[in-house]
Amino acid sequence: GAVVSQHPSWVICKSGTSVKIECRSLDFQATTMFWYRQFPKQSLMLMATSNEGSKATYEQGVEKDKFLINHASLTLSTLTVTSAHPEDSSFYICSAMAGAPQETQYFGPGTRLLVL
Amino acid sequence: AQKITQTQPGMFVQEKEAVTLDCTYDTSDPSYGLFWYKQPSSGEMIFLIYQGSYDQQNATEGRYSLNFQKARKSANLVISASQLGDSAMYFCAMREDSSASKIIFGSGTRLSIRP
């Protein structure tokens, strides 16, 4: 299957700093990437949909100014958590799909963010 | 209303037995897809199996099969001959083709395999 990577896998930062998480599709071109957040013992919640070359579409309740998403190329999307606070501590997972809506989404390994 | 419902928060199964994980869904979209993902403690989401709403046959992938009952809106995952490595969280998910490829996840079932 297709491979999606995320970097970093772990990040610990101080409150008030910004953190950038990268999501890359390694062996295919991803027209669409998705960003999810997962709190402990909970399910994945979709944060936003990212299409290459256009603005991301955010889900209701997700602050677009806090969670900046850039999908600059067909293999890279980035999520920047601006002015992170302890309540932003979570597991962030991206997924990518190649083309048609019926295509399977492939998930990255996730990034654990801890804000102190 | 919940679009994806998994009613089993946790299950214990003896190794080598078959196990069925329940999933029901709710949609008015005639075209949709159903997925099952496995999430081990490492956190990665592993794609297991996919069923399209128009597929006539139940999907199978190795030891995984999806019991798709369209009229009942259920998409249960069956794992045959369970193994210790099957212990993980399992998520049922749905994509409505009218919703820009977004996948909605159920709350998950934690499966524990006993040796």
Image (spheres, coloured by chain):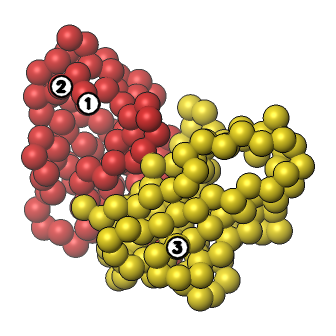
**Callouts 3 and 2 close, C-beta under 8 Å:** no
Which numbered disc, 1 or 3, marks the residue closer to the eye?
A: 3
Image location of residue A81, percent across then percent down: 75, 57
- A34 left or right of A102? right
Image location of residue A114, percent across then percent down: 71, 38
Q: Mark 2, chain letter?
A: B
Q: Is residue A107 above or below residue B83?
A: below
Compute the Cα span from label 1 to label 3. 32 Å
Q: Is residue A69 above or below residue A9?
A: below
- Give the SS element for disc 3: strand
Hey, what amino acid is under mark 2? Gln
**Callouts 1 and 3 close, C-beta under 8 Å:** no
Q: Is residue B115 above or below residue A40?
A: above
Compute the Cα span from label 3 to label 2. 36 Å
Q: Is residue B26 visible?
A: no
Q: Are marks 2 and 1 on the same chain?
A: yes
Q: Mark 3, chain letter?
A: A
Q: Name the residue nearer the viewer: B1 or A95.
A: A95
Circle 3 residues within 10 Å: few <14, some 14–19, many ≥20:
many
- B89 left or right of B16? right
Q: Which mark is residue A21?
A: none
Among the chains pictured, the one given yellow colouring is A
Residue under numbered circle 3: A76
Residue under numbered circle 1: B86
Q: Residue at x 13, y 51 (%)?
A: B61
Image quadrant holding the N terminus of chain A, namely bottom left
Q: Quadrant of residue B13?
A: top left
Compute the Cα span from label 2 to label 1. 5 Å
Circle 2 residues within 10 Å: few <14, some 14–19, many ≥20:
some
Q: What colour do you see for chain B?
A: red
Image location of residue A17, percent across then percent down: 85, 51
